[in-house]
Image (spheres, helix red, strand yellow):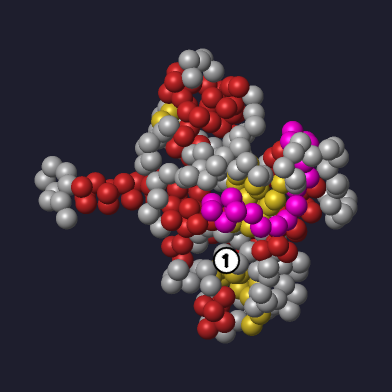
């Protein structure tokens, strides 16, 4: 049995420290996206496995369960990685954790009368970088966050309070649409999203998010540049806070904003994801440039 991440498919996996942390935190974001095999016990687990986390040195990571089974590991009897889990079960578990009071697993009912259009509907949105939670209303997509983002519970509670609407697991046409668009985006076949968006926020937040959507695909700007575009050149810190409050990751591309010195800065979904998203956009942009033709490179 191997003691390091298997080479086949390893390039698509997160950094090793992120995978180890996902196991320690029993992260739902990587459930079905990566599998952890434990050398000392010979079993392979899902990331949300309830068993006591193994030592980091004993873990081998795989992008597909079949790879671990081929290497001789057997499925864990506690988390049952071979069992098929519905998207609804996954979503209900994420919502329960987000709304459960401290010390309790029971989901809290959001008080208040719905603001109209029925409850908000949540469902799992899989991506190559981990599962996201999507939330939609009748008007459009209101939230799209990586499931392991530390602020996810806070964002969900704020959303439910501001719209005075409970959040329930289910299916919705806007969520079906954003899944399809994200598949096309990660495949390099799409550069903009057409799913309707609902972006409640302060006037400054809405202006900051609108500025993010105007940053060209494959390019980055500094926080200072974004502040100048907003007519608030000294409000760099406020711009960073507004970007951090963005509830629609990737679709409203806060990953395209960097520090003035060229370093990436922070990202709610993790800096490693910010790096992967930018690498994808740049690679697609380079392919597009080659197809269109550029000085010294014949068009194809």
Front residue of this view, candidates 67 and 297:
297
- Which residue occupies 16% across, 44% down? 294
- Which residue occupies 52% across, 78% down? 67
Residue 171 located within the stretch drawn in magenta: yes
Q: Based on the displayed image, in which of its 4 quarters is residue 84 positioned? A: bottom right
Residue 153 appearing in the image = no
Residue 218 appearing in the image = yes
Give residue 59's position: percent from left, percent from top: 60, 69
The quadrant in which the C terminus is found is bottom left
Q: Secondary structure at mark 1?
A: loop
Give residue 40's position: percent from left, percent from top: 66, 76
Residue 100 located within the stretch drawn in magenta: no
* Image height of 193 relative to 232, above or below: below
- Which residue occupies 55% across, 68% down? 61
Q: Based on the displayed image, in which of its 4 quarters is residue 157 positioned? A: top right
Numbered circles on residues, count: 1
- Which residue occupies 61% across, 73% down? 37
Give residue 23's position: percent from left, percent from top: 66, 61
Quick one: label 1, few (<14), some, or many (20+) residues within 10 Å?
many
Range shown magenta:
160-178
Give residue 83's position: percent from left, percent from top: 68, 77
Front residue of this view, candidates 135 and 16:
135
The quadrant in which the N terminus is found is bottom right
Pointer 1 residue? 34
* In-image side of 277 versus 202 (left or right): left
């Amino acid at each position: 049995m191997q003691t390091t991440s298997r080479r086949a498919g390893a390039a698509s996996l997160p950094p090793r420290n992120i995978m180890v942390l996902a196991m320690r935190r029993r992260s739902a974001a990587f459930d079905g996206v990566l599998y952890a095999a434990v050398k000392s016990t010979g079993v392979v687990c899902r990331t949300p496995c309830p068993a006591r986390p193994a030592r980091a040195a004993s873990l081998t990571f795989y992008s597909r369960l079949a790879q671990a089974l081929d290497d001789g590991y057997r499925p864990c009897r506690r988390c049952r990685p071979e069992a098929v889990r519905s998207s609804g079960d996954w979503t209900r578990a994420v919502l329960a954790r987000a709304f459960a009071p401290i010390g309790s697993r029971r989901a809290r009912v959001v008080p208040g009368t719905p603001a109209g259009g029925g409850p908000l509907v949540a469902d799992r949105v899989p991506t190559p970088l981990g599962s996201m939670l999507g939330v939609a209303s009748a008007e459009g997509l209101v939230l799209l966050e990586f499931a392991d983002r530390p602020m996810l519970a806070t964002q969900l509670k704020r959303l439910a309070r501001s719209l005075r609407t409970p959040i329930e697991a289910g299916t919705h046409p806007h969520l079906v649409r954003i899944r399809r668009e994200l598949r096309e985006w990660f495949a390099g076949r799409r550069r903009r999203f057409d799913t309707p968006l609902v972006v409640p926020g302060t006037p400054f937040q809405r202006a900051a998010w609108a500025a993010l959507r105007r940053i060209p695909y494959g390019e980055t700007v500094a926080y200072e540049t974004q502040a100048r575009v907003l007519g608030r050149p000294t409000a760099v810190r406020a711009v960073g806070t507004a970007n951090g409050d963005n509830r629609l990751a990737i679709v409203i591309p806060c990953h395209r904003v960097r520090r003035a010195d060229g370093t990436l800065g922070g990202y709610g979904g993790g800096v490693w994801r910010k790096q992967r998203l930018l690498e994808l956009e740049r690679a697609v942009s380079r392919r597009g440039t080659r197809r269109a033709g550029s000085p010294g490179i014949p068009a194809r």
